[in-house]
Image (tube, rainbow, N blue to C red):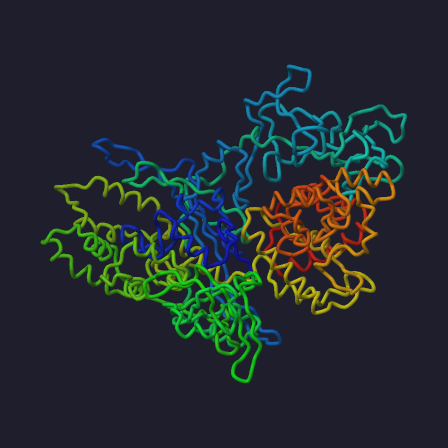
């Protein structure tokens, strides 16, 4: 297993992902707001801000082994203002099994150590939500569902009032060039594929008007009116508005159907007219109704686990209404645990890490006591070195991923070559990462020195502690009530030994070491939440591996032991506590699942911080692993096309900057990165940004040509009136604009009107400073936005790269018609192969 994904595809760096968890309303690791053990983390309304929490994705490659989906979430009857109020709670979950293993050592037959672990996703939506919204995507591991046209659908064919049903369309969109292929009566069973507003009809070759008794289609089409998509799939050409399906393979056949521009079909045969085999058909998802999925309202343990990839859909967040809450909360409880001997695995993994190559050391350790030099204008290495002796020191260790350092702009790095007195050094300007002994942020410059500041392999598990905790909920609640001063004197005397035992236990003791900022000997959720907002503390807490009984392993005596603390007895019943105990029993699942999937039946497991684990072991090169990509590209460079010049060091540095800029753009913007789109963009850069006078690839240099060459783009100097008019239409209005706004950057941005468009989009004045458009920090966003939104020619990436096709050949129309389209398409295929090996880019649209 090598692929990881944040459950909500957070693209920020691992430290920001950890500190983001401080925004949760409750449910911190490893303590809840009620002081009880909490083996996971919550995503709720507090974390929603910058995250798209509309769907939950799988944390890592694995296999679904168990789940539960209730038809309707159960409710708990609580007494509120002397009235019984039913409050719903989602107990739906998905359990995924994974296998964790360090990479193999090249040239060694030895097998790396391995660990089986599980990820748990609790409080998901119930089946009724999916019934009410047929457009809501279903997880792929559910049993195949049956769909029918809704009974209340009342579409009609244009110009008619009957019959009524569901219109079948020729394209998955509304608007022009749309063809109504068929009308499906209410109740018609259908099978569909895809996502989004419109779904593709499967198991039907075409409309009823063309279908023979055996399901095959009548009709022939003129081959000249088709554009090739792939294989036997073609699209009605954009050169005409429509095409006729004829009854015979010549012009004398009668017309059976009109196919509009863009309709996709499959054909067979040879010659001027080809046999029609199928027509792509689409229906509105909201007009379909699903029948109840099998195996609802029970825990399902799969006889045959279903493989699932990192980033694949798990489900959607459900509602959970707490006893004292006025309104229900949408929240996800995410948990990671293992039933294996984790201590043995960690020890073996650390030994294995010592044998791995240095290039795999991707985390820089800034040890406690690192000097942080306050930034001043015109900072130099010499000045920073002098100031470091009197600078404030960091108060905690911090492991910093290489991707964070790579992403720093040039003005936040100062490199110092080796000298007789010291090794090579790099100064990095860091903000918001380190803190002092009073938990105040330390922003400024830190120094890395080769051979002195350690780089670490993630498989060395630096900073991780394994803690065995045998405390009970009774001890934890006694500590909590003591801390919030809920006990009277008699209760305090009775329960103080329990509270003290909990506070001196291994988990609380370790937390005190990390975060008890006021040294009052009390550990509260508020202190824990404040600590998580600091990267170093959040990281230290995420490095706690805690062996403890699972919350989902139910033993009634464990909870009955809280009766006295909560004031419940036979003579004075605490009705809400009785209701809560019933809820705890209903939500538990461990005993029904454990032995069937390889977990210990006695309920104890090693718990990991889920966000911390994923961030630690995910590839540390951003979406694209910079070093791996460069290595693989360098090996393939000369195979891109015959006669390719060798890759100079300068060209390699250019490409590195491009990949870092692509990573930075997608990490800081909500746009979803797609492997095929990035492949085509890189292919475009390789072609457009080649500076042939010096053989420099991926160059920041502008379009080649002397001053007079660009007269053809000038409104005054162009010799042809047509060229002068074209220049004016594209915003070049003054003499010299042709040269001033010549091609620059990854896609050779040309014309003043385009420079103005991107000045507005990126809030940077490219009109006054056109040379800036050539710099990768600007030219990468220009390329991504321009190709995604169709700014250059009106054609966009999604027109040619989508769930139905990957058409690199036609995608050239996004930039420059058909110019060198075959060559650039071949580049895209090669970049695609490299990115599949070196990135976590999604292959889904």
In the image, farthest residue toward the bottom: 420
Q: Position of residue 32 (x, y in %)?
A: 31, 52
User: Residue at (28%, 65%) from the top-left corner?
Assistant: 509
Q: Quadrant of residue 605?
A: bottom left
Closer to us: 524 or 367: 367
Closer to us: 257 or 599: 257
Q: Quadrant of residue 107?
A: bottom right
Left or right: where does residue 429 sit relative to residue 681? Answer: left
User: Residue at (59%, 34%) from the top-left corner?
Assistant: 197
Q: Position of residue 814 (x, y in %)?
A: 73, 44
Q: Quadrant of residue 771?
A: bottom right
For residue 788, above or below residue 594: above
For residue 827, above or below residue 651: above
Left or right: where does residue 645 sit relative to residue 294? Answer: right
Q: Quadrant of the C terminus?
A: top right
Q: Position of residue 450 (x, y in %)?
A: 53, 76
For residue 255, say whether it is visible.
Answer: yes
For residue 90, above or below residue 36: above
Q: Position of residue 269 (x, y in %)?
A: 85, 40
For residue 339, say whether it is visible.
Answer: no
Left or right: where does residue 477 sit relative to residue 616? Answer: left
In the image, farthest residue toward the left: 490
Q: Quadrant of the N terminus?
A: bottom right
The image shows a total of numbered marks equal to 0
User: Residue at (62%, 65%) from the top-left corner?
Assistant: 628
Closer to us: 477 or 250: 477
In the image, farthest residue toward the top: 161
């Amino acid at each position: 297993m090598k692929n990881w994904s944040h459950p909500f595809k957070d693209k920020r760096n691992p430290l920001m992902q950890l500190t983001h968890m401080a925004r949760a309303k409750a449910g911190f690791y490893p303590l809840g707001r009620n002081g009880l053990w909490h083996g996971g983390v919550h995503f709720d309304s507090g974390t929603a801000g910058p995250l798209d929490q509309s769907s939950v994705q799988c944390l890592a490659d694995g296999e679904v082994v168990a789940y539960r989906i209730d038809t309707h979430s159960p409710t708990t009857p609580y007494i509120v203002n002397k009235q019984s109020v039913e409050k719903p709670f989602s107990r739906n979950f998905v359990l995924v099994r994974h296998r964790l293993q360090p990479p193999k050592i090249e040239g060694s037959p030895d097998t790396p150590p391995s660990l089986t672990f599980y990820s748990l996703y609790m409080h998901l939506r119930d089946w009724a939500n999916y019934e009410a919204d047929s457009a809501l995507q279903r997880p792929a591991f559910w049993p195949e569902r049956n769909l029918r046209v809704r009974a209340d659908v009342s579409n009609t064919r244009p110009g008619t009032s009957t019959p009524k049903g569901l219109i079948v369309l020729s394209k998955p969109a509304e608007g022009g060039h749309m063809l109504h292929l068929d009308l499906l009566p209410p109740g018609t069973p259908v099978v569909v594929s895809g996502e989004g507003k419109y779904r593709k009809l499967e198991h039907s070759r075409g409309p009823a008007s063309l279908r023979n008794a055996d399901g095959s289609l009548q009709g022939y089409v003129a081959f000249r009116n088709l554009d090739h998509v792939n294989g036997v799939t073609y699209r009605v050409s954009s050169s005409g508005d429509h095409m006729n399906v004829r009854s015979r393979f010549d012009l004398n056949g009668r017309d059976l159907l009109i196919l509009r521009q863009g309709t996709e079909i499959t054909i067979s045969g040879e010659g001027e007219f080809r046999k029609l085999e199928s027509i792509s058909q689409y229906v509105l998802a909201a007009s379909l109704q699903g029948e109840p999925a099998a195996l609802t309202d029970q825990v399902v343990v799969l006889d045959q686990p279903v493989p699932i990839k990192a980033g694949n859909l798990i489900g959607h967040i459900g509602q959970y209404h707490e006893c004292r809450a006025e309104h229900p909360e949408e929240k996800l409880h995410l948990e990671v645990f293992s039933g294996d001997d984790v201590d043995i695995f960690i020890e073996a993994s650390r030994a294995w890490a010592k044998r791995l190559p240095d290039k795999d050391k991707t985390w820089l350790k800034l040890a406690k006591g690192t000097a942080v030099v306050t930034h001043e204008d015109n900072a130099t290495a010499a000045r920073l070195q002098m100031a470091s002796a009197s600078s404030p020191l960091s108060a905690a260790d911090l492991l910093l991923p290489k991707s964070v350092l790579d992403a720093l702009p040039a003005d936040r790095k100062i490199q110092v070559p080796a000298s007789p007195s010291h090794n090579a050094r790099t100064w990095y300007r860091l903000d918001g990462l380190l803190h002092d002994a009073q938990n105040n942020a330390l922003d400024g410059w830190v120094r890395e020195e080769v051979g002195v500041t350690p780089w670490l392999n993630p498989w060395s598990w630096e900073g991780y502690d394994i803690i065995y905790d045998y405390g009970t909920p009774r001890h934890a609640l006694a500590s909590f009530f003591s801390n919030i001063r809920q006990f009277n004197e008699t209760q305090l005397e009775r329960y103080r030994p329990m509270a003290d035992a909990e506070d001196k236990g291994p988990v609380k003791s370790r937390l005190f070491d990390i975060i008890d900022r006021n040294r009052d000997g009390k550990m509260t959720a508020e202190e824990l939440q404040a600590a998580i907002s600091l990267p170093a503390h959040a990281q230290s807490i995420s490095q706690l591996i805690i062996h403890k009984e699972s919350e989902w392993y139910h033993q009634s005596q464990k909870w009955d032991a809280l009766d006295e603390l909560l004031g419940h007895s036979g003579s004075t019943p605490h009705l809400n506590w009785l209701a809560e105990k019933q809820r705890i029993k209903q939500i538990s699942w461990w005993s029904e699942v454990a032995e069937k999937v390889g977990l210990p039946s006695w309920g104890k497991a090693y718990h990991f911080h889920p966000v911390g684990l994923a961030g630690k072991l995910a590839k540390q090169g951003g979406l694209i692993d910079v070093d791996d990509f460069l290595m693989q590209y360098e090996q393939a460079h000369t195979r891109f096309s015959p006669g390719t010049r060798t890759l100079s060091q300068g060209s390699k540095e250019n490409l590195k900057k491009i990949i870092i800029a692509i990573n930075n753009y997608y990490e800081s913007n909500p746009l979803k990165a797609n492997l095929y789109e990035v492949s085509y963009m890189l292919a475009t850069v390789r072609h457009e940004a080649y500076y042939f006078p010096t053989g420099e690839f991926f160059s920041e240099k502008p379009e080649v040509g002397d001053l007079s060459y660009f007269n053809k783009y000038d409104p005054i100097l162009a010799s042809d009136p047509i060229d002068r008019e074209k220049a004016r239409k594209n915003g070049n209005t003054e003499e010299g604009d042709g040269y001033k706004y010549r091609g620059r950057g990854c896609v050779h941005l040309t014309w003043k009107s385009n420079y103005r468009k991107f000045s507005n989009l990126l809030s940077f004045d490219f009109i006054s400073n056109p040379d800036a458009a050539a710099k990768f920090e600007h030219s990468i966003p220009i390329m991504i936005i321009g190709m995604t939104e169709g700014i250059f020619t009106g054609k966009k990436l999604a027109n040619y790269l989508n769930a139905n096709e990957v058409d690199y050949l036609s995608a050239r129309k996004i930039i420059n018609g058909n110019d060198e389209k075959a060559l650039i398409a071949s580049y895209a295929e090669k970049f695609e192969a490299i990115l599949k090996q070196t990135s976590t880019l999604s292959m889904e649209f």
